[in-house]
Image: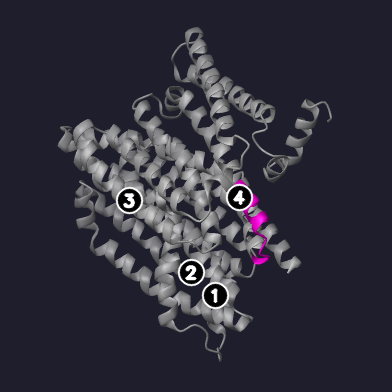
Amino acid sequence: MKNNFGNVMKGAIILSGASFIAKILSAMYRIPFENMVGNLGFYVYQQVYPIYAIGMTFSLSGFPVFISKIIAEQDDMESKYQISKRIFNVLVVLTILCFLFLQLGSTQIAEAMGDIKLEVIIRSVSWMFLLMPFLSVGRGFYQGIFNMTPTAVSQVYEQLIRVIVIIGVAWYAVRHHWSIYKMGAWAMFSSTLGGLVALLCFVGIFIRLFSRKYHKHSINYRDLVKRLMTEGIMICLFTALMVLLQLIDSFTIKNNLEIYGLSSIKASNIKGIYDRAQPLIQLGLVIGVSFSSTLLPSLTAAIEKKEKTIFENTASSILRISLGIASAATVGLLALLPEVNKLLFGDSELSLVIGIYLLGIILMTVINSYSSILQSIDEYKVLLIGLGVAFLTKYILNSYLIGKVGIIGASIATTASLLLATIIIILFSSIKLEILFRSDGYVLKLLLISCIMGIVVKGLSILLGYLLESSRLDVGIISVICIPVGVFIFGILAIKFNLFTKEEYMAMPGGNKIIKIIDKLNGGR
């Protein structure tokens, strides 16, 4: 048991590190990509991107987590191999249906998105779904036997190849004057190429999987499909919440902007600028969640040992660390948003719209933390209700607000839907908020520290703006100066006000160094 837990902790650290690298790659490539292809090229890519992202999320974290749980339940290796093969067969049927739906329904989907020319890009992304059974089962099997290395390596390779191909396609398309739709189709096909490279990490397991003869009978197909369509799909939906909200945007924003009075080209251009928020919010989420991810296996260990106090303390630390870091990232981005927008994308258009959208970083961090905590105790119902409310609210508000107030309505809809989901999950889950935040004034401290940091960073950026010009280079200088100042202020104030406990600092990357700094500031006490 002790050795098994050690493997879990080691594996979690490996997987967290690889996931962090993959997500950074996934967030950052869109900045040079947008600069190369422009707002319209970015619009074309982002309209179909949620379809890819759903498939990627399902094969990277959704289905593998579900499969690993089933694998871990089996008593011997023969049963593990047999159940893996059965899951593979079920996923093959499911993904072929997805592939056919996208191929045959591409015209109708593109029309629903308000741009018939998107059909070629939808057909292009459909091919990656055929790789889902291989990637999901390969990752899930190894995670189920506590070997996280193949999953970690595969996801880094997949994103690295995909990013290289996308940037290469963008460069070639601009150089040879391709249409934005042809560029989008080839850029989206990068997901299939990345998946094929990732698949190389699992060749060995599939050779063993299909060369073995099975004599035992494990879970029958009927029970397996039932679990997959309930527990498995729920896990996938939770991990893809933000992407699913983006998919609603793909179907509603352009159409409603035209109702608002914009031409088709203008609406497409505005949607492309609005989508600048995606890499920023993804980066904020990566930073927020990565600081607490090493604590997740401790939840499982506490449940197995039935140690309620340890479970509550660990759950509290996960939420406190994630929320603290996400708040710092969000406030920092908001304080520097016009500068960051211009630095990364060449102008500061729609900074207010993007700023409202970025409030979702804090809300999604809370939802993700609660989701991890509640899934560890198999509490799915409240998460499913919160998820449904978020989707319904987003669709209704998008449909109403965008036609009335323009693109800012989409940002308001996203933030409002996430806020409602957060409130529902907090109010109706069995994990009460007072247990997670304890009685040390955490929320008030965090609000005070974030406000001070935001005011100082904003004031400094305004002062530097008077001294420098408004060129892209100048706003880059402002950002380079203000970001470390903001980090320093938040860090010092967090230590001064005891925002986190010593144990929580130790759980963060570089925790030992942080403790040494705290000891020095306290005069070695």
Position of residue 421 measured from the top left corner of the image (x, y, whole percent): 39, 48
Query: Disc 3 or 1, which lies upstream in sequence?
Result: 1
Query: Disc 3 or 2, which lies upstream in sequence?
Result: 2
Position of 400 relative to 1 (above/below): above
| Rendered-image quadrant of the N terminus | bottom right
Q: Secondary structure at mark 3?
A: helix
Q: Residue at x 55, y 79 (%)?
A: 209
Task: State the residue in front, 30 or 286.
Answer: 286
Label 1 sits on residue = 206
Asked if the residue under mark 2 is in contact with the one under mark 3, i.e. CB atoms within 8 Å, the reply is no
Find the magenta span and give its range: 304-316
Task: State the residue in front, 521 or 53.
Answer: 521
> Is residue 313 in the magenta section?
yes
Asked if the residue under mark 2 is in contact with the one under mark 1, i.e. CB atoms within 8 Å, the reply is yes
| Distance from the alpha carbon under mark 1 to that under mark 2 | 8 Å
- Give the mark toward the camera: 3 or 2: 3
Q: Is residue 323 left or right of residue 178?
A: right
Asked if the residue under mark 4 is in contact with the one under mark 1, i.e. CB atoms within 8 Å, the reply is no
